[in-house]
Image (spheres, coloured by chain):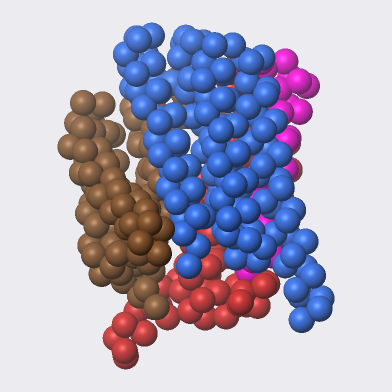
Chain colours: A blue, B brown, C red
Amino acid sequence: MYHDTALVTLLACLTCFYASVRVAKARTRFGIKAPATTGNSDFERVFRAHMNMLEWMPIFLPALWLFAIYVSDPFAAVLGLVWIVGRIMYTVAYAEAPEKRRAGFAIQALAAFALLIGALVTIVLRMVHG
Amino acid sequence: MYHDTALVTLLACLTCFYASVRVAKARTRFGIKAPATTGNSDFERVFRAHMNMLEWMPIFLPALWLFAIYVSDPFAAVLGLVWIVGRIMYTVAYAEAPEKRRAGFAIQALAAFALLIGALVTIVLRMVHG
Amino acid sequence: MYHDTALVTLLACLTCFYASVRVAKARTRFGIKAPATTGNSDFERVFRAHMNMLEWMPIFLPALWLFAIYVSDPFAAVLGLVWIVGRIMYTVAYAEAPEKRRAGFAIQALAAFALLIGALVTIVLRMVHG
């Protein structure tokens, strides 16, 4: 069983939900009624912070689980937590200004690629060495 | 094997595809040519209904499977079916008016959170009690 | 273990990342500053090519893995590679003109549905025949 990775997966899901709640609140605050998603750049930054997380979820989740299975469950979970911290930083900072999103972006990208490359190398080694 | 959850997963995938087909049809009907996604609120509601499903897929699918693995396969599948019903209601009703999307949204949110919280509590209990 | 499918999954993640890098480059090239995603149809085609891949990831990945588990790991991987080829064709061609995206779209849709229907039929047969 992969308890650590399972737990971090659900924390990532909750982080995704948190980013969507911020969008719902920003709709009210900046007067952007559904279905519109444009027209106010303060709203758009909150909206795009959520979208960017969605863009990374199908990279992060498969990389996280394949790393957990092929490399290590607790190490996957630690990198997953780093990813979540980077995503929260990105989400909060992007709402303030576009430039401020860079630090959080870099952290989550490094964590995601550590998971992806770690899993990729291990899978290829297993295929080659049987 | 998790036959029930596997089947419901593919039904959720087909529901996602159904929402995207509605967007393609709405492009023709309301004269919104790709790559545009704005300019007509009738089109935008159909478009956003699909997008909202995409926003929930990376919450729903991990929660569904971790619930299936840690709690129960058939119970996960039943909650998954409720989620799909909520999503179809949301997709159809949002196309009519933004206010009408609330019932379907509430149903799918409750089903997704039942899966997520059920899995989360069970994982934590397993970690604590070994 | 499902080495072939695991490897193809990570290649799909990298393809997703590649499509997002094209969006970042298109931002600079066509002068569309974050958080904006509209205002220039050259940029919008690159942006929508990435978005369309994201729309298919939650259909493709579950179908790929359930096909691998219920039908065949290497056959899933081959169909997964076809899907990736279709996605790259779509991404590159859509950046040139909306009409050009049809061939890549058809290829990836056929591969995704072969995976989905293959898994669906096998799961139902298993449920019926125990």
Which quarter of the image is occupied by the C terminus of chain A? bottom right
Q: Let me know if residue C26 is in the magenta part.
A: yes
- Residue drawn at point x = 51 percent, y = 45 percent: C55
Instruction: Indicate the position of residue C50 as horizontal and vertical percent values.
Output: 62, 39
Q: Let me know if residue B110 is in the magenta part.
A: no
Rendered position, C34 above or below B65: above
Rendered position, B25 above or below A129: above
Taking the image as shown, residue A107 lies to the left or right of residue A24, namely: right
Residue A35, image quadrant = top left
Instruction: Indicate the position of residue B22 as horizontal and vertical percent values.
Output: 37, 44
- Residue drawn at point x = 34 percent, y = 30 percent: B45
Residue A88 seen anywhere in this rendered image of the structure:
yes
- Residue drawn at point x = 31 percent, y = 52 percent: B121
Instruction: Indicate the position of residue B94 as horizontal and vertical percent values.
Output: 27, 33
- Residue drawn at point x = 22 percent, y = 54 percent: B82
The span picked out in magenta is C5-34
Residue with the most extreme bottom position: C129
Q: How many marks?
A: 0
Taking the image as shown, residue B83 lies to the left or right of residue B34, namely: left
Main secondary structure along the magenta-highlighted residues: helix
Instruction: Indicate the position of residue B31 as horizontal and vertical percent values.
Output: 44, 30
Residue A22, image quadrant = top left
Residue B40 seen anywhere in this rendered image of the structure:
no
Taking the image as shown, residue C37 lies to the left or right of residue A40, namely: right
Residue with the most extreme front position: B129
